[in-house]
Image (cartoon, rainbow, N blue to C red):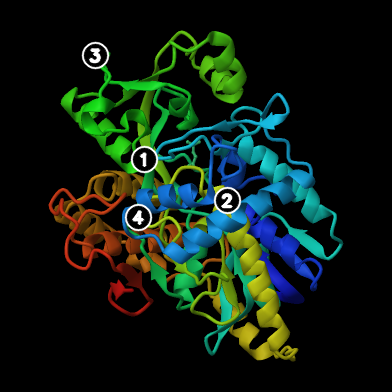
Amino acid sequence: MLPSVKTVDFLVIGGGVAGLRAAIELASKGSVIVITKDRPTESTTGYAQGGIAVALSDEDEVCIHYEDTIKAGDGLCNENAAKVMVEEGPGYLLELMSWGADFDKEGSKLSFTREAAHTRRRILHSHGDSTGKEIERVLINKARSFPSILRYDFAFTLDLIVENNRCIGASVLKGDKIIHIIAKAVILATGGAGELFSRSTNPMISTGDGIAIAYRAGALIVDMEFVQFHPTTLYSPGAPQFLMTEAMRGEGAVLKNIVGKRFMPEYHEMSELAPRDAVTRAIVSEMVKTESRHVYLDLTHLERDFIKKRFPLIYTTCLQYNIDITEDVIPVCPAAHYIMGGVRTNLDGKTSIKGLFAAGEVACTGVHGANRLASNSLLEGFVYGARAGKGAVRYAEKIKERDIDKTPYNKHVTAAEEQSVTAFDADKTKSSLRQLMWNKVGIIRCEKSLRSAKNRLNKKDFILKETFNNRKGAELKNMLTVAGLITDAALFRKGSVGAHYRSDFTERGENWRKHTVCVKGEKTGWID
Ligand code: SIN
């Protein structure tokens, strides 16, 4: 059966904060399709607990938020991008509140919490620890209010359609049908790649799809070695790797090793509120020293009622595993959480491919540098989602309406029909890939571990050459693609900066101020 062709002004791939905010920006300028590969509410945004960092409190200033962001980024932030984010962020948050977002208050004033590496209380939160859900709810409702926005849920993007370095749409799998959606501009907002690691805070949909399809299309992919590992996720037999928000430490929780000794003051002057990469490595060091698979997070010294009110989701989730966080210490261990690298964009979301824009975790604007400041990602999603929307409008206004020539799309039809025949067990391959990435390309890496990962990945190269028209196969191919990019970049950066830590190169190394870049068909290199 031939794929169908659908035309639209703007195609947005991804339905988290960046994608929805972009779609809202586009809604008055033309027709918009928003694609999500799962349920509309299933995005990393929806899982965010701690909150959203924004300089709106009386004790805060935009310039202090900027300084904290730059410091956490460990010398690799794009300073202009960070400045834009902290300056424009407050306006987007006030707008969100005018659309009905309900953030927690103390009396009539907004309540702000603290998280690691913030020198001020500046994190807005909702229903205690369900901030992402509230943001997603308001954005979904807002997007629904525009008749020009059409949603395609459970629609998986197989590849971008690119002609002469111009993106003109995407091939999308919906049910068992392939649709070629042709658009004047495409915005990638597919989120991250946490699912590549066997320990991850991300939902299962975070398989790096956007980075993989942009790479296959020839886009510049930068800083892939910078994977952030969240220090504290639940570690208990049979329990999910549930996030224990950093806001718990912001409210006074402390970390103890398995013999009950508080250790962070020995590692960093900011103790439990040190930057995330420092806390994660300190935990690993204590786990090694004590030959344990976890440490403990302890907030039992805080008021019981306060804990239950402030962290209701965590309280009820832990109770299901017989941990009463008001009385018991919580076994925790780090897990992959966020990728700072991604598809390189400028401040308007433009990628290196004409007509292709990117925003949110899939993109690398450079705001996070080598280590993201906690709770800056939702803010980035708002600011750069809207900016990518505006950038796409400007781009679309300049290009002429195109005649739809069936020929190029038919190329993809044929490709999709020539589906793979090689037999392999996708579930097993995925599971061993996740173990490999955690063990060899995880929190602490070295030449030997990375080379051994690379050799194992090379053995799966045949999967990268296959064409899939089913979600499972295509996702696995994307995961293997992104795993290769992370491993190559981690091998290439012979030094330790931010979240990228090499036990064989503990100093920053040559060229450390540059960014790594991967382009299809070329060796990993440096870029300014
Ligand atoms: C958390 O709540 O600890 C996660 C916040 C973030 O990653 O920005």
Q: CA distance from mark 3 to mark 2?
A: 38 Å
Camera-near label (3 vs 1) is 1
Q: Which amino acid, mark 1?
A: Arg
348 relative to 149, above or below: below
Instruction: Tell me the number on the disc at residue 295.
Output: none
Dot 1 corresponds to which residue?
276
Q: Residue at x 54, y 9 (%)?
A: 304
Q: Residue at x 51, y 56 (%)?
A: 361
Dot 4 corresponds to which residue?
370
Mark 3 and ligand 1: say if the CB distance to the nearest ligand atom is below 8 Å. Answer: no
Discs 4, 2 touching: Cβ within 8 Å: no
Indicate which disc, 3 or 1, sits on the residue closer to the N terminus: 3
Instruction: Tell me the number on the disc at residue 259.
Output: 3
Q: Residue at x 43, y 46 (%)?
A: 373
Instruction: Tell me the number on the disc at residue 379.
Output: 2
Mark 2 and ligand 1: say if the CB distance to the nearest ligand atom is below 8 Å. Answer: no
Mark 1 and ligand 1: say if the CB distance to the nearest ligand atom is below 8 Å. Answer: yes
